[in-house]
Image (tube, rainbow, N blue to C red):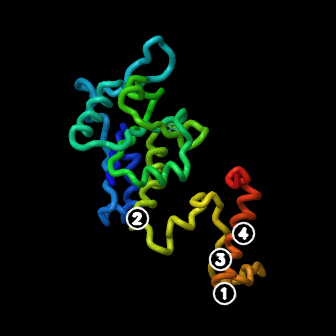
């Protein structure tokens, strides 16, 4: 899979891809992540990428030309399955969307900034608009990292058995059950006896019950 992220702040995005699972996924050749500096497509000697909004109002708007030139260049090199725009008014991201995006070959993620992008970009280039939640961040970079992380860890071969995505919260519409590690007793606080029983079947049953119990209590909407 190849993920091209268009941003005015590539430095802000670099670190999440240089550690742990995301780094390993790239080193294994399972995903290629390219951070593309929109400034390289900026206009004039100041490499301008934003301008005042027509009709007035506070805040700058990202211009159509740099983004169009950037996307057109990428599209001339390969075909893309989705061109995603990160925006608080997009569809809310969830595990199901992560699952389907993880099956794609080439995607572009455009990180918005300022007051947003010229609407014509959304009309003519963007195929999917994603929000990571009902709150407004100062740019689309952190959302792009969140979405990329959720996608990449689902690519076959990225996680090993121990960290299998199949046991994640949400993967089966259930929150994950509680987990414990050594010591078995701390400060008089004991772990559930069943986890020391060595009886795999009963442990699986206990975990499932705890997952259902936790989901019922915290996220009953998931059980519908
Ligand atoms: N840009 C700013 N806030 C955002 C959000 N909540 N989701 C996606 N992109 C954003």
Label 3 lies in ligand 1 vicinity (Cβ under 8 Å)? no
Q: Alpha-carbon distance for marks 3 and 1?
A: 9 Å
Residue beneath disc 1: 199
> Earlier along the polypeptide chain: callout 1 or callout 2?
2
Q: Quadrant of residue 206?
A: bottom right
Q: 14 and 176: which one is in front?
A: 176
Above or below, comparing residue 17 to residue 49 in the picture: below
Q: Alpha-carbon distance for marks 2 and 3?
A: 24 Å
> Earlier along the polypeptide chain: callout 2 or callout 3?
2
Q: Secondary structure at mark 2?
A: loop
Residue 42, how many percent across, how many down?
Answer: 28, 29
Q: Is residue 184 left or right of residue 37?
A: right
Above or below, comparing residue 145 to residue 49 in the picture: below
Q: Alpha-carbon distance for marks 1 and 2?
A: 30 Å
Q: Alpha-carbon distance for marks 4 and 3?
A: 10 Å
Q: 84 and 110: which one is in front?
A: 84
Label placed on residue 210: 4
Q: Alpha-carbon distance for marks 1 and 4?
A: 16 Å
Q: Quadrant of residue 195?
A: bottom right
Label placed on residue 204: 3
């Amino acid at each position: 899979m190849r993920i091209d992220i268009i941003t005015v702040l590539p430095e802000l995005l670099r670190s999440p891809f240089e550690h742990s699972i995301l780094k390993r996924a790239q080193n294994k050749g399972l995903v290629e992540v390219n951070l593309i500096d929109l400034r390289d497509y900026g206009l004039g000697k100041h490499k301008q990428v934003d301008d005042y909004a027509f009709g007035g109002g506070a805040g700058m708007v990202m211009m159509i030309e740099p983004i169009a030139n950037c996307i057109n260049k990428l599209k001339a090199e390969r075909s893309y399955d989705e061109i995603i725009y990160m925006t608080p008014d997009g569809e809310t991201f969830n595990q199901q969307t992560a699952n389907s995006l993880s099956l794609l070959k080439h995607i572009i993620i455009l990180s918005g900034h300022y007051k947003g992008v010229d609407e014509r970009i959304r009309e003519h280039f963007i195929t999917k608009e994603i929000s990571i939640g009902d709150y407004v961040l100062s740019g689309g970079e952190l959302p792009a990292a969140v979405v990329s992380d959720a996608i990449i860890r689902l690519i076959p071969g990225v996680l090993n058995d121990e960290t299998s995505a199949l046991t994640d919260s949400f993967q089966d519409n259930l929150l994950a059950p509680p987990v414990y590690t050594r010591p078995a007793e701390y400060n008089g606080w004991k772990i559930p006896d069943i986890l020391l029983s060595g009886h795999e079947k009963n442990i699986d049953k206990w975990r499932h019950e705890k997952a259902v119990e936790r989901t019922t209590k915290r996220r009953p909407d998931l059980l519908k």
